[in-house]
Image: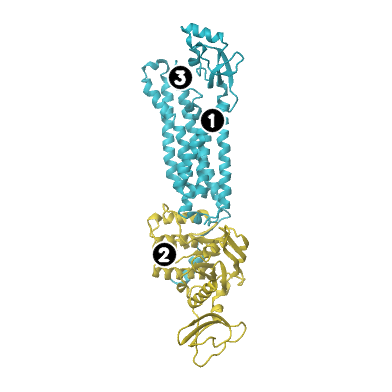
Amino acid sequence: MTTTTTTDVTTAAPVATRTRVGWGDLLWLTWRQHRWTILGTAVVVVGIVAVALGFAWHADATAENHDRLDRSSYVDVSQLLALTPTALGVVIAVFWTAPLLSREYEQRTHLVVWSQDLTSIRWLVGKIVLLGAITVVLAAGLGTALIRMMNSMNAATTDHVPFQPFEEVAFEAAPQVQVGYAVFGFALGLAFSAITRRTVLSMGLTLGGFFLARLLVSGFWRPYFQEPLRKVEPYDDSALYWNAGNDGSWTVNSGYADASGNEIDFTRVCNSAQSNDNYVKCIADNGMQTFRDYHPADRLVSFQWFEFGVFAVLAAGLLALTFVWVRRARPV
Amino acid sequence: MTTVVEPVDRTAIAVRAQALGKRYRSKWALRECTFDLPAGKVAALVGANGAGKTTLMTVLAGLLDADEGSAGATGRVAFVSQEKPVYRNFSAGDMLRLGARLNVVWDDSRARRWLARFEIPLDKACGRLSGGQQAQVAFALAIGSRPDVLMLDEPLANLDPLARREVTAELLSEVGETGMTVLLSTHVVAELAGVADYLLLLAHGRLLAGGDLDELLGRHVSYTGPRSDVPPALGDIVEARHTDNQSTFVVKLPEGQPRPVVAGPWTERLLTLEDYVLAQLEATRKGARA
């Protein structure tokens, strides 16, 4: 090779020049880095969706002669499936986003990627938008398929329906609730990832934080998203147990009330009653009634949107925190 | 021909720092750093461990914001941190694809030539390459992005002696072809002889000396002679060492005056880069103790 040809090659070298790094490039990077995580999760979710839709189809097709179904195991499997909504948010949080930034910090690769022609913020926006979009699609698809399955299973049953709409499995499987959890998990994992910069620590904190938030909201806040209605009825020892829930309503509290409907402690005055009828009569004579605080069935959808809202607001806050943190924290 | 290839403004500044300061919590890692690095230079950023080399470089590369003063580089900057990080599950080819995707300017042939030069396999995951090979991938990525300023933090650290020489030679040839400015930090001064033509000497977060290397070295002389308390020529004593019957002085000659001629028992020696750096660092250490 002579000097002349070398010079020619250098000057004619195909130096690609552009004005900016585009979304396609961020998409390439995101896919190249996370393809196995994305594919693994997607395969499982698509599998569950397929099984759920298969169950739904089966329940629809055999609604008239459901006696021939092996119902108990059938319902068991479908109830097991119904637990997967809880799992998706956790998987996204712990395995997608909790290592996302911390692994870059640990392996120092953030210095590589942020010293190319794109800023850390633009890199972060790209990752959030692309992975977030996949998260939303997976969560919404899973929720839709599971709700479809539950509706079909309920429709195929004549007595006590297997999925009460306000029960946790059914309530939380709704697509908007699913999206809320997944988005929250996404943002929670990312925030811990940015703050701790340690993958294992971030994964552990995310796991704990996710369940804690879910528990607090579903156990302590959800019953009071709206003021429950109170229904006061004369004492009837069978009604207490059988009335609750069969109309799709959700009983959050029940007990004894005086004639004007205020909650009272149960009195033992009637404990000496000899027969059941005497007991009921004694209760009535003492002016005692039973009450039930409940949410009517038509509140279901607004409750589900409220739950989505709670987690969406949390997610937005956590994402904002992550941006501030990444921009402010020293990268080295 | 050379004059045509050279940038029109030969005195253009590639990297500039003005009263630059950076602190971590209350401790200043860098203070009052002021220098202008002319374009096309190969500058060595030298200092003891913990002198603030990495901090200065990350601020100059724009990865870290300064707490006071200002810093800036003209044009595009490529920075390779001292760990030479690469994505472990990316192959060397993937790393180049990353470079092509994430840079607005990308010279694929140049990057591939670098990898070929050091015989790095393109299809093997970087995690399975040796530390030295990973460093070459990181260098190829930086070279391929055709930077105006290339910043390398401890580039030679995990290379074998032969690779060190080859890397510096390749870097110089890249500088010759593209006219880029190189700023590299190191505490192994000996390897910079013949490579660097500009020196930035850091100690305890402050810039001890900075300037054209030939000029700096030309203004300093080492005298060796019989035991004496004063050197044979006027100037600032940078370093003085005494044995029982011999004294050695490193003297900074006053500016704008001809070199003094010394005779008699004194021998005069020009300083090497290593002598100069060691003398300066030694002086700060003594100063810090006093």
Is A259 on the left-hand or right-hand side of A43?
right
Looking at the picture, which amino acid does disc 2 mark? Answer: Asn
* Measured Cα–Cα span from mark 1 to mark 2: 57 Å
- Tag 3–tag 2 contact (CB < 8 Å): no
Q: Position of residue A37 (x, y in %)?
A: 43, 43
Is B88 on the left-hand or right-hand side of A253?
left
**Location of mark 1 (residue):** A220
Specify the label residue B37 is tagged with: none
Chain in cyan on the image: A
Q: Is residue A108 above or below residue B50?
A: above
Q: Depth-wise, is mark 3 or mark 1 nearer the camera?
A: 1
**Location of mark 3 (residue):** A161
Q: How is the image coloured?
A: by chain
Residue B72 shows in this picture:
no
Is A300 on the left-hand or right-hand side of A40?
right
Q: Position of residue A323 (x, y in %)?
A: 57, 47
Looking at the picture, which amino acid does disc 1 mark? Answer: Phe
Q: Position of residue A136 (x, y in %)?
A: 52, 37
Whether callout 3 and callout 1 share a subunit is answered yes
**Location of mark 2 (residue):** B158
Chain B appears in which tint? yellow
Name the element at disc 3. loop
